[in-house]
Amino acid sequence: MVERRLSLKYLTQTLYQEGQRPIVPLMGYPGLQLTKTTVKQNQFNHIVQFQSLSKLYDRFRPDAMFFLMDLSVEASALGLPVRFPLDETPSVEHHPVEKVEDLDQFRNIDILGDGRVLVYLETLRHMKKAFPCPVGVFTIGPLTLAGLLMGASELALKSILDPKLFQEVLQFSHRVILRYMEALYREGADMIMVLEPTAVIFGPNQFRNDLSPYYRQLVGLFHEAEIILHICGNTTPLLKEMEDSTVAGLSLDSVVDMAQAAQILKPTTMLIGNVSPIDMLSEKPEVIYQETFDLLEATKDFPLFVLSTGCDLPQDVPMENIEAFFQAGRNWKKEERATEKASSF
């Protein structure tokens, strides 16, 4: 077991006192440009993935680093039919659960015996040894894994029409994720980001009743790691419920107004985000610089703000745009905000 465990929250507090912000983009796949490797090679080979992450780290020196985001790891470890293109993210092709009995085929599977799960555990081991910064991992959320088992639309329908089946699938999914998280935690993950894109379909009451208890349990079980919750889409109506689940931080999509979010959240919650990955892919470096600088200005008074991206960066994001993102983050300083904008690009 790795004993060293670092705190992103402590780093954020320290930098805030110095008028700066930690810079932690959700990047991993752009490293494939530097190693000239495919998505599939990185998701099936821990040495290849670590090399891609290492080259990114060496080039940009972020204040924390996550391994590759992959929403199919737990599903494929259960044996769900997953399509693995050479250079695209995997996708689940069939959702086999229609009734409670359909879960029986998965109950005796230990996902820690799966080859791809072992790839990510090995990648984490390499990162903990090599990177001097906080190291983060991703897991799927229980609702989203339940959606892969049943289909997201069917899951939403069953949450109303067949709540017993809904709860059974949700509880099963949570147990699967716990098994994976326990292994990541043992290997010393400093941060565990729970990816729950399906939760955006819930209203505040359903989120509070059906999901928050699971997140609270994760926080209690893995108390030495920082649990971060990421939900895609406009989560503004859910911010208080997300925060009340007691997670250490919220990673928010680029469609969320971060200045507004900063007004809603407590100053003890980490606010993480949220430069647009689409802009990072398609805009010019000077636009990215200005967008990043403006985001820092909009959140300048929120104590626990972490400069990041609204979601995972696509593999084809130009390196010049990542450079602009980091440059803006390092040039900005609270109370000493220069008129210098994007003239260097």
Image (cartoon, grey):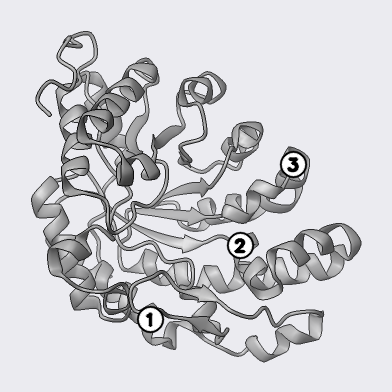
Q: Quadrant of residue 69?
A: bottom left
Mark 1 residue crowding within 10 angstroms, few (<14) / some (14–19) / many (20+) = many
Which of pointers 2 and 1 lies earlier in the amino acid sequence?
A: 1
**SS at mark 3?**
loop
Type of amino acid at the residue the image marks with label 2: Thr
Type of amino acid at the residue the image marks with label 1: Arg
What separation in Å lies between label 2 and label 3 (alpha carbons)?
A: 15 Å
| Residue 332 in the image, given as x and y percentages of width and height | 20, 21
Q: Which residue is mark 1?
A: 116
Q: Which residue is mark 3?
A: 203
Type of amino acid at the residue the image marks with label 3: Gly
Is there any visible trace of residue 147 in the rendered image?
yes
What separation in Å lies between label 3 and label 1 (alpha carbons)?
A: 34 Å
Q: Quadrant of residue 342?
A: top left
User: In the drawing, what numbered circle is on residue 144?
Assistant: 2
Which of pointers 3 and 1 lies earlier in the amino acid sequence?
A: 1
Front position in the image: 120 or 82: 82
> Measured along the vertical axis of the image, is residue 10 above or below residue 297?
below
Whether label 2 touches label 3, CB < 8 Å: no
Q: Quadrant of the C terminus?
A: top left
Which of pointers 2 and 3 lies earlier in the amino acid sequence?
A: 2
